[in-house]
Image (tube, rainbow, N blue to C red):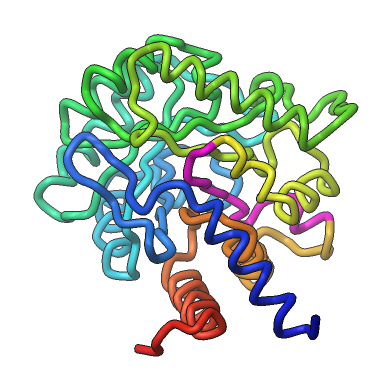
Amino acid sequence: MNEGQVANTEFAIFQEREVAKTWRTARREIDLAKPVLMGVLNITPDSFADGGRFFDQEAAVRRLEQLQEEGADIIDIGGESTRPGSLPVTEDEELERLAPVLEATGRLVDVPISVDTTKAGVAEAALAAGAEIINDISGLRFDPDIGELAAQSGAGLVLMHIRGRPRTMQEGIRYDDLLGEVVAELRESVTRALAAGCQRSQLVVDPGIGFGKTAEQNLVLLNELGRIGELGCPILIGPSRKSFIGKTLGLAVEDRLEATIAACVVGLLRGARIFRVHDVRPARRALDMAEAIINQVNGGEST
């Protein structure tokens, strides 16, 4: 078998593992036939990636429109930092940060809105304001009521893998079988969601790049994403600007764009369909080009 045949076989394997062509949310079905870009909007004073640039409400509202203009298919809004070492905020404070931006979404953008929260009360308020996806970094471990809320509302639900809490998750990291344990713990989250009444078509899984993993472990997870595909759910990855890039290449946060794109493209080749990024426009171009090449390799027609 020559190199081209090997490449074709690998692409075919990942395509065969692609579980769903769509992702059902509270308001629509999102087409997963092409890479889906989830633009990040952190309304926090201490985000690791943007340093609180959008904590100001007017700046956050302007960023909403900009993310859509840059090609975001989804906008993920969060009011609580989950960077390593971060402290939790109260539900009231999180809602106070989110409310003005959520109010503006219906007027300014028409792409699906995701709320990045681990609190059922915050998620419920966001859904009432028009959000249609819940992005739970705890995989239903911090507040199991999110599962029932997603089931009742029909919201899309992202189940992420994490070890510990954001404040302590990078302390004492140990896995005897990294891939096996991540898959098993994500499977527990999927089981919880289904037991709460969610449909599998609502669920997306995220291996939790940067959440309770070393830099080396993040590299392994990205290279072995096919194992996550065993869960039968579409895969989301969020490598954008994260510290594993800085530790691997010695780069400051503001210099991690190209490496983020590289991680996303490898993720695409390994089976990811949804990509949570800060820099939407360059990621959009890179992933669309990679997808065009893959389709051509597989005998697809160029467009």
Quarter of the image where the N terminus is located: bottom right
Give the vertical position of 250 relative to 178 (above or below).
below
* Residue 144 spot, x, y in % from top left: 45, 10
Q: Residue furthest front?
A: 1
Tell me if I can see residue 255 in this picture.
no
Q: In this view, does 108 lie to the left or right of 15?
A: left
Residue 121 in sight here: yes
Residue at coordinates 77% horizontally, 37% vertically from top-left?
179
- Return the residue nearer the eye: 45 or 215: 215
Quadrant in which residue 116 is drawn? top left
In this picture, is 48 found above or below 169?
A: below
Q: Residue 99 location, x and y as percent? A: 23, 31
* Along the viewing direction, whichever of 242 and 32 lies nearer the viewer: 32
Where's the C terminus, which quadrant?
bottom left
Give x and y (percent) for residue 241: 63, 57
Q: Which of 289 and 281 is in front in this view?
A: 289
Q: Which of 44 and 238 is in front in this view?
A: 238
At x 23% / y 17%, what residue is drawn? 152
> Does the magenta run of residues contain 233?
yes
Q: Look at the image and say whether residue 146 sits in the magenta stretch.
A: no
- The answer to whether 213 appears left or right of 279 in the picture is right
Q: Which residue is drawn at 53% across and 61% down?
A: 15
Give the residues in magenta.
Answer: 232-247
At x 24% / y 28%, what residue is drawn? 154
